[in-house]
Each structure stands twice: as structure tokens, then as C-alpha cells.
Image (cartoon, helix red, strand yellow):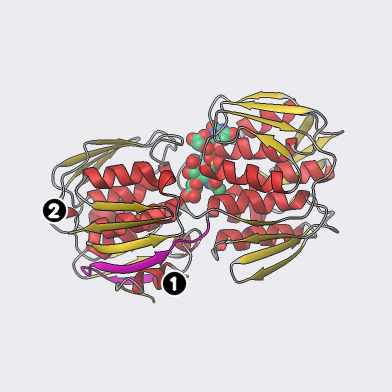
């Protein structure tokens, strides 16, 4: 079988050095979608150089925006963007492309998107997005796998989300900032990326308040101006590198982070015996390797501020080596354990049943040929490979490149023996 991209890791080397943590993927995507709403050029700084942001730029280009990628910033000028269709290939490349729906509707009052479809972690429905938008005056019709969305004009509404969906919260914010009237979102997602989107929109002249709490109020504005904005750092990338140090051992300083957004990951790794020192926008983690630690009992993923579902996979990998038994309960997505079978090939002892994974710690993991099947599951395989004895080949590494900027460079700078095949 020919693989697009494979990572080769010779494990067992403690990690030492400094990581300047990348910009947040899950901020960059909604903020790139929001740039469509500006009356001029937006400069978005600290954008991670990953395939998902490249896909988002492809979508903006397909809608008629003028874009430019310059190092860690992206320029977007939507002045002549009159497109309203996101083609199937782009929707399938990145299901979170649905986040463009709100801003296309706000700009064109018409949008045509193919159903994003499921991915390897679950069915990923969009019912909460559609029911919210219909309350704001959007009508939908489906044909040949495409969803045609039209409105005579978006109007403010009271939106009560039955689940604090990140994407649905963001789509409503993007639709409401130029709607006629006021929109209130209750049971809104509270993730730091929602606060970042509010910051970007308000810098453009929008009137959004309450992000980070369960209730967000958006007062519609006729137009929004161009802006230069720096997005927050990626708390999931930072947490993943913390799990790598916990598993492989070593001492690493993470820079350009928000320690508060990492509190649940820090608490679990401290309980497991790692040393974590926090300083302003930096954090140092030290570990003798997870085999010297005790397991954390029960770990449950929850909407923010709970332990993030995206941190579940890398943390499972680290806990494979902790003494004792660790129980994981995944409460957000229904199929987040596809990578577990690959960890078993490396000598891990994990039993899964639906949303529960039970890990019995082992003394060592062994290098093996494994396959990534989703972004965070791929990251889990990297964490395990760094701690394993011998060589691991991770195939389908393009999944990992969707969310981790130059992961080979970051880890080899810490002393890891990692390269692309
Ligand atoms: C965002 O996905 C993130 N993606 C995900 O990160 C993250 O895991 C997730 O939020 C939860 O924090 C981006 O921000 C681009 P949701 P999203 O809507 O918006 C159900 C990563 O690895 N649901 O909060 O799709 C859904 O099925 C990615 O970086 C509905 O039922 O997540 C899931 O069970 C993976 N109907 C739950 O809500 C809907 O209309 C959470 O989904 C929408 C969602």
C-alpha cells in the first residue's frame, strides 16, 4: 500500500528543550470564516501552518477572496468575493467547513454546501446549526447531497442550544453580527476559541458580549471593518506536547500559552506524578516517564471548562505506561477510540466498550507499524511512539498534519529521533 505520508520515530529518548506553541487551529478556522464579513483586508496573525488552515484558505479563494499566506499570518480581502458555494471536495476535506455557512449567509443571503458527512470520530450532525439558523430566517432545501440555504435577511433571535456545540455557537455568532436586531445564545459553548472569535468580531466593529459564559448576546451591525488580529495559542497542541513529555520523560518549557486554558490537563499530569511549573504565558513540565507515576483513576471528557475531548487521545497514550488502571469516559463523540487498536499493537493493554476505555498500565511499549485514522488519534500514536522501545512507523501521517504545525521539527528540536519517511 502506498501511503501519502509516514512518520518514523525511534523512541525511548527523553525530551528536553523549548516549544513555542503554535496558533490555535480551532480559532483560526472560525476567524478565517469571519474575515468574509469585513469590508476590506484582514490580517490574521499567529495562524498555524497546517493543512486545515490551508483548506480554509482554499475555501476563501473559491468564494472569490484575495488571500495571501505570509509566514505566520494570513491576509484575506473579501472585497470582490461573490461566491456562495462550498464544493463537495472541500467540504469532505474538512467537515468543519460548515463553519463558513454563517458568514456566507451573512454576506450573500444564499449558501450552498454539501453535507459535511461524518468523520472517523463520529457522525458529526449539524441539526443544531440548522435549527438555529432557521430561527434567524434561513430556509433550507436539499438536493443531490447539497444543502441550499436562503434568507430574505438574517434577523436576530433567541437561540437555546440543547448542547453547547462549539460549531453551532460559532455559526450563530457569524450569522448574527450583521443580522437585523439582537441575538441571544443560551447554553453557548464556553471554549477559549469562542472568546477569541468574539475578540476578532468586536475588533471588526461588531457588538458581541458574553463569550466564555453560557450566554452570548450579539447586536447586529450593518457593516464590519477590516482588522489586524492575533489569534490565541493552541491549547490542544500544548497539551499534546505535555503528554509526550509525561510519556517519554524529560523537561520541556512551553512558551506562548494560556496556562488557565490547560488547567485540566495540568491537573491530571500533576496527579500522575509530573512536575508542572506555571509562569504567565509559559509552563515547564518535567517527568521521569509515566512508568514512575500512578494512574489517574477516572478521566471524563466534557465541554469546556471540563477536560477536552481533543485531549483524550494523547492522554490515553500517556496513561498506557502509568502504574495501575485508568478509566476514560468520552462524553462528546461516539467513536473516538479507533486509534486504540494501533496502541495494542505497541503492547498497550486497553479494553474499550462504547465510550469507555479501561487502561491497565504496562512497563513498556514497543515500536510497531501503525496507522493514523484521525487527527488526535494520530497524535496519540506519536506520544506512544516517543516512549516506546524501538522504531514506530506511523502511516497516514497526513491526519496529524491537519492540526500540528511541523510536528517533526518541534519534536526533533526536543531531541526526539523523528523524521518523515
Ligand atoms: C469543535 O468541533 C472542534 N473543531 C473539535 O475539534 C472539538 O472536538 C469539538 O468542537 C468539541 O470541543 C473545531 O473547532 C474546528 P461540537 P464541532 O459541535 O464544532 C454534537 C479537533 O480535533 N452535535 O461541539 O464539530 C456532535 O455530534 C476537532 O481539533 C450535534 O449533535 O463540535 C458532538 O457529539 C475534533 N448536532 C457534540 O455535539 C450539531 O448540530 C460536540 O460537537 C452539532 C454538534
Task: Find the residue positioned furthest to the front.
Answer: 280
Quadrant hosting residue 352: top left
Residue 292's tag is: 2
The residue lying at 61 percent from left, 32 percent from top is: 210
Q: Which x, y percent locates residue 152?
A: 87, 33
277 above or below 17? above
Give 192 or 28, whichever is nearer the viewer. 192
Q: Position of residue 399 (x, y in %)?
A: 47, 60
Q: Which sits earlier in the primary sequence, circle 1 or circle 2? A: 1
Is residue 400 left or right of 185 when viewed as pictured? left
Q: Which residue is mark 1?
A: 2
Magenta residues span 1-23
Image coords of residue 142 (percent x, y)? 73, 37
Report, in whole angstroms, how far the alpha carbon at label 1 lies from the one at label 2. 39 Å
Residue closer to the observer: 88 or 282: 282
Q: Residues within 10 Å of mark 2 (few under 14, many from 20)?
A: some
| In the image: residue 137, left or right of residue 323 | right
Regarding residue 417, the answer to whether it shows in the image is yes
* Vertical comparison of 9 with 298: above or below: below
Q: Give the number of the mark in front: 1 or 2.
A: 2
215 drawn magenta: no
Element marked by disc 2? helix
Occupied quadrant, residue 241: bottom left
Q: Secondary structure at mark 1?
A: loop
**Quadrant in which the C terminus appears:** bottom left
Residue 278, position as x, y percentages in the image: 34, 51
Amino acid at each position: 500500500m502506498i501511503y501519502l505520508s509516514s512518520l518514523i520515530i525511534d523512541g525511548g529518548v527523553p525530551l528536553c528543550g523549548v516549544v513555542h506553541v503554535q496558533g490555535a487551529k480551532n480559532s483560526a478556522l472560525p476567524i478565517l470564516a469571519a474575515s468574509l464579513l469585513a469590508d476590506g483586508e484582514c490580517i490574521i496573525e499567529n495562524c498555524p501552518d497546517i493543512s486545515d488552515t490551508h483548506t480554509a484558505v482554499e475555501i476563501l479563494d473559491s468564494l472569490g477572496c484575495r488571500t495571501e499566506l505570509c509566514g505566520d499570518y494570513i491576509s484575506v480581502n473579501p472585497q470582490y468575493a461573490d461566491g456562495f458555494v462550498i464544493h463537495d471536495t472541500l467540504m469532505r476535506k474538512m467537515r468543519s467547513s460548515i463553519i463558513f455557512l454563517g458568514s456566507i449567509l451573512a454576506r450573500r443571503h444564499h449558501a450552498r454546501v454539501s453535507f459535511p458527512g461524518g468523520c472517523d470520530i463520529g457522525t458529526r450532525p449539524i441539526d443544531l446549526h440548522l435549527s438555529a439558523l432557521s430561527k434567524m430566517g434561513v430556509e433550507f432545501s436539499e438536493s443531490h447531497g447539497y444543502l441550499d440555504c436562503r434568507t430574505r435577511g438574517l434577523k436576530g433571535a433567541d437561540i437555546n442550544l440543547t448542547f453547547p456545540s462549539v460549531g453551532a455557537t460559532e455559526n450563530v455568532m457569524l450569522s448574527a453580527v450583521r443580522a437585523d436586531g439582537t441575538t441571544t445564545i443560551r447554553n453557548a459553548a464556553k471554549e477559549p476559541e469562542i472568546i477569541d472569535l468574539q475578540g476578532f468580531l468586536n475588533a471588526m466593529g461588531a457588538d458581541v458580549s458574553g463569550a466564555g459564559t453560557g450566554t452570548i448576546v450579539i447586536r447586529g451591525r450593518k457593516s464590519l471593518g477590516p482588522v489586524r488580529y492575533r489569534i490565541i495559542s493552541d491549547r490542544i497542541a500544548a497539551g499534546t506536547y505535555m503528554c509526550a513529555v509525561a510519556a517519554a520523560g524529560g523537561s520541556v518549557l512551553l512558551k506562548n500559552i494560556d496556562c488557565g486554558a490547560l488547567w485540566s490537563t495540568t491537573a491530571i499530569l500533576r496527579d500522575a506524578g509530573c512536575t508542572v511549573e506555571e509562569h504567565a504565558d509559559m509552563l515547564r513540565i518535567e517527568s521521569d516517564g509515566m512508568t514512575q507515576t500512578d494512574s489517574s483513576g477516572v478521566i471524563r471528557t466534557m465541554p469546556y471548562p471540563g477536560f477536552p475531548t481533543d485531549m483524550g487521545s494523547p492522554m490515553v497514550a500517556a496513561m498506557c505506561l502509568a502504574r495501575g488502571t485508568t478509566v476514560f469516559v468520552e462524553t462528546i463523540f461516539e467513536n473516538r477510540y479507533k486509534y486504540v487498536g494501533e496502541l495494542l499493537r505497541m503492547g498497550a493493554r486497553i479494553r474499550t466498550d462504547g465510550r469507555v476505555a479501561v487502561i491497565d498500565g504496562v512497563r513498556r511499549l514497543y515500536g510497531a507499524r501503525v496507522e493514523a485514522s484521525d487527527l488526535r488519534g494520530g497524535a496519540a500514536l506519536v506520544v506512544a511512539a516517543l516512549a516506546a522501545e524501538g522504531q514506530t512507523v506511523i502511516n497516514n501521517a497526513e491526519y496529524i498534519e491537519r492540526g500540528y504545525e511541523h510536528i517533526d521539527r518541534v519534536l526533533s528540536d526536543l531531541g526526539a529521533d523523528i523524521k518523515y519517511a
